[in-house]
Amino acid sequence: MTSNDPASRWCCVAEIDAASASDEVIVSEVTAWRIIMDGRTLDITTSPGWMEYLERKEDRLDDEGGAGAYDTMRCDFILNGSDQDSKDRWRIWGEEFHINRLQNSFRALLNDKYKNVSFDRALQQSRTIIKHLLAQAESSVILLDVPFNKRDSNNDDVEIQLIRLTLLWSLDNLSGIIVRGHACSTAKPMFVRSSVQPIVAAIAARCDDKHHISIDDHMPTRSHNAQCKIASWTRLRQQMEQPLAYKPAGVAEVLMVRPLQNNEMELLEGSSSNVLVVYKDGSPRTAPHDVLSGYVRNLVLECAPACGLRLDPSPILLSEVDQWEEVIITSSTRLIYPISSILIQMGIKGGSAFDEFWSYRPTTVQADEPSKRAKWRHLLDELLHRNGYPRQE
């Protein structure tokens, strides 16, 4: 979802003017993407880099939650519909869901001293910041002054600019809550369906020569506070996302697991996504407990019956890998991405050899009918349709 060249991205930040009694919003376009702090190079065109920058600038690294509670939503601006009013060209994915989850995440960070803090003003400021950031996107030459891709203009796909919008609530000893916003885009037009391509994932665990799978207890985990989106997690998870840890070159997502009784290992979620596995009997599973109740995860579970899928509430066990037909990640900005293969690190701690743990293998029928070859395509089409996009013929 991010461009390899940060300098080519579009990015804006917004905050409430502290000197204003009427909550005026200050919007600033990010022109210098790289900031070096404490020996670290931070890319502030990404929301994790921006939040870590604020943590270091405001001395919040040791605070519970770091810079505070945050939530990120996807905002699609439709390009091949220039005759429409601008408000009709936006597809905002789950605005109220994300604002409500942000409020709940922030509440979980409060100690007794701040239990009576009011959220009303922060909620209003959040909605105001969203409007200002989207208005800034609408006026951006970088985002909108792009030629329509005529090569694909005859198909039924929709071309968009995808804006990733993050709201951050930080604790302030005087006013209670500081509300800030961050919006970014690769500035590269994309099609909502054909831009989705399979990715490679890796499990945050090791497999020894006896096929015993173990996890590193020193790696961060979020299962103890899974329902909260807190800024410090986006920094801590980077320990797993290093090439010598669990994210070698070519891997797009790290999948977290935990041990169960009887030496079983449960697949939980991605470091920045939820995970859904469709078993060969046609039943989808997602971790029932101790994972983030993701916006798109919930939408997929709602859409599953319309796609002929009946949810199995059982946990996803690594020992059942031979029964997996499809593995999918879901997230607020990526929606649905299929996984083509899953890797696992082999050998002792510190090794860098990865082997294939699972891979997608279409059946003969699926291979003969590419448009219907995978269930994730049906789920994605249903998801898009419910948010105002036409169905794919």
Image: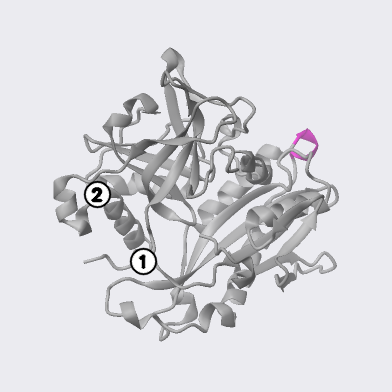
Secondary structure state at the residue bearing disc 1: loop
Closest to the observer: 73 or 207?
207
Residue of label 1: 388
Q: Magenta region: which residues?
A: 111-115
Chief secondary structure of the magenta span?
A: helix
Q: Nearer the viewer, residue 175 or 195?
A: 195
Q: Mark 1 Cα within 10 Å, few/some/many (few <14, many 20+)?
A: few
Q: Position of residue 69 (x, y in %)?
A: 67, 47
Q: Position of residue 362 (x, y in %)?
A: 23, 46
According to the picture, the residue beneath numbered tag 2 turns out to be 307
Residue 315 visible in this rendered orientation of the protein: no
Q: Position of residue 386 (x, y in %)?
A: 34, 59
Instruction: Determine the residue positioned at 18% across, 52% down.
Output: 367
Nearer the observer, disc 2 or disc 1? Answer: 2
* Residue under the point 33% across and 80% down: 151
Query: Which quadrant holds the C terminus?
Result: bottom left
Q: Amino acid at mark 1?
A: Gly
Q: Which mark is residue 196?
A: none
- The mark that comes first in sequence, 2 or 1, is 2
Residue 167 lies within the magenta run? no
Q: Amino acid at mark 2?
A: Cys
Q: Quadrant of residue 322?
A: top left
**Local crowd at mark 2 within 10 Å, few (<14), some, or many (≥20)?**
some
